[in-house]
Image: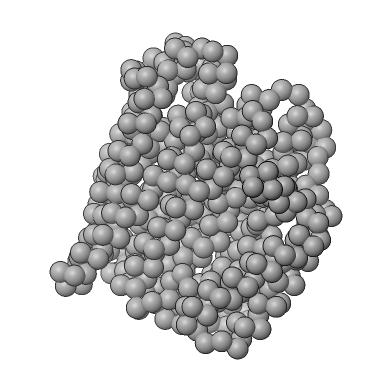
Amino acid sequence: MSRSSSSRGAAWVAAGIFASRIFGLVRQRVLAHYFGQATSAADALAAAFRIPNFLQNLFGEGALSASFIPEYARLRAQGQTDEARRLAGATAGLLAVVVTLVVVIGVLGTPIFVDVLAPGFEGARRRIAIDLVRIMFPGVGLLVMSAWCLGVLNSHREFFLSYAAPVGWNLAIIATTIVGAYRGNDARLVLWTAYGAGIGAIVQLAVQLPRVWRLLGGVRISLDRRSPSVRTVVRNFGPALLSRGVVQVSAFLDGIIASWLPIGAVAAITNAQLLYTLPVSLFGVSIAAAELPDLAEDTGAQALRDRIERASRNVAFFIVPSAMAMIVLGRPIAGLALQTGRFTLEDTDWLWGTMAGATIGLLASTLGRLFTSAHYALGDTRSPLRFALVRVSLTVALGIGASLYLPPLLGINPRWGTVGLTVSAGLAGWVEAGLLRRSLARHIGRFSVGAGLLFKLWLAAGVAAAVATVPNVMLSERWTNRLFVLAVFGLLYLVLATALGAPTMATLRARMSRRR
């Protein structure tokens, strides 16, 4: 596929994710308005929402992306349309069996799940969390099946619908929460939110199925594992599931450790992840998802190196200013996103600190997504698993020390242990990215992300942040002023990046000129 086609694919992924994440922010703002951050209900909701997110990311962005998409794309590229259709049907059938088992186990074992994922929860927090998880689990199965739709759509390079489909999930949660609040039943409002998640799962799957059916020309669901292609997918599914699962467990570990911190810590970690993973999702996931089918079809080490280097530069161009903004301008970002109703200015400052700690590993996380996709395209699903285990081990060791023991030693409020958690995860992310890069170099030869480009981008972002700090300090906390500060930063970064001759900025200018 041409470079322009790949760029368009990344743009469609980014557009879909942007729509989904914008509505995700609206959803979280509605929840923040009614539940705040430092409350038992907010903590319980944060813990409960981690389960559907975990399983969808595990099956969608992880196992199916690594095992199904490369094999399905290869069959289509070779003109084996009927075999590709049979592969899709068998994958759907086998996945449905796995999903059914997961849902049954989840509903029956909800108290155990809560005790494992939030061992620090006691009393009201634990009771609320158990009720919420039990209500949400059936919908989790539908979210996992929507991951199969994502795999088919991405293989056909129809990226927008698959990544925008969660808009329906978010809208259902928003609507049921507002209706529940309107009815004035505060004691059961959190349950309305949970039922909305189940309704949203139905919507998310339903909006994708018609298009998937047309692309496949109809599909016969089966459990047939005799085809070599199906066996390849099944063989790669296990290691990919474990690899992606380890990465997801890393995020869960933050919540597990945070459950021992003061009330609101789990919600603070979740809110921070929502904000700092936005650029990762928009740029890291979009570029990696758009490149995966092409990486699977490309042959030759030089072609792969060129594609990875170009994608790495695209990632850095957007992630570097995102990291700088969250460090220096995190307060207006957090306030603009969530400060409303019961979510106070004190909550905003807590969220800013937690979010700023995570920016240490922001670039590493996005590059790691790309390097992992390259391994998957090469058929290597085991190396990312080993490196993910290293990352999780470091996250646990550093996170426990930095969050539970460091604040008392420094004589600060224990709630700031959330910063120690995000900093630890960021440092572990750099270790994983380095290991992935070295392993990839053994496959295709050494490649460069571009030290000179990174220097220019950090310089442009640093100067832009310094200038934007002036109106940030002088103006009030109104949302319009916060938006103005962020606009100043963004526009100035683009101007400085252009003046410094950043290659990605030059590419964007050339593309706009061609369109004109």
Looking at the image, which residue is at 57% across and 56% down? 279
Most foreground residue, 202 or 428: 202
The answer to whether any part of residue 263 appears in the image is: no
Q: Residue at x 35, y 54 (%)?
A: 170
Report x, y in % for residue 75. Answer: 54, 17
Which residue occupies the foreground of this view, 490 or 285?
Answer: 490
Q: Is residue 380 above or below residue 184?
A: above
216 is higher (above) or lower (below) than 271? above
Camera-nearest residue between 66 and 414 = 66
Q: Residue 164, image x and y in percent?
A: 42, 46
User: What percent of the width, then of the height, locates residue 449?
Assistant: 78, 47
User: What colour scheme does the image use?
Assistant: one colour
**In the shown orientation, is residue 38 left or right of residue 128?**
right
Toward the viewer: 439 or 331? 331
Q: Is residue 462 visible?
A: yes
Q: Is residue 245 above or below residue 462?
A: above
- Residue lying at the far front in this picture: please name it: 516
Looking at the rendered structure, the number of numbered marks drawn on it comes to 0
Task: Look at 64% across and 71% down and name the residue there.
Answer: 489
* The N terminus, quarter of image: top right
481 to the left or right of 127: right
Q: Residue at x 84, y 55 (%)?
A: 452
**Left or right: 42 in relation to 160:** left
x then y, percent, for residue 324: 67, 67
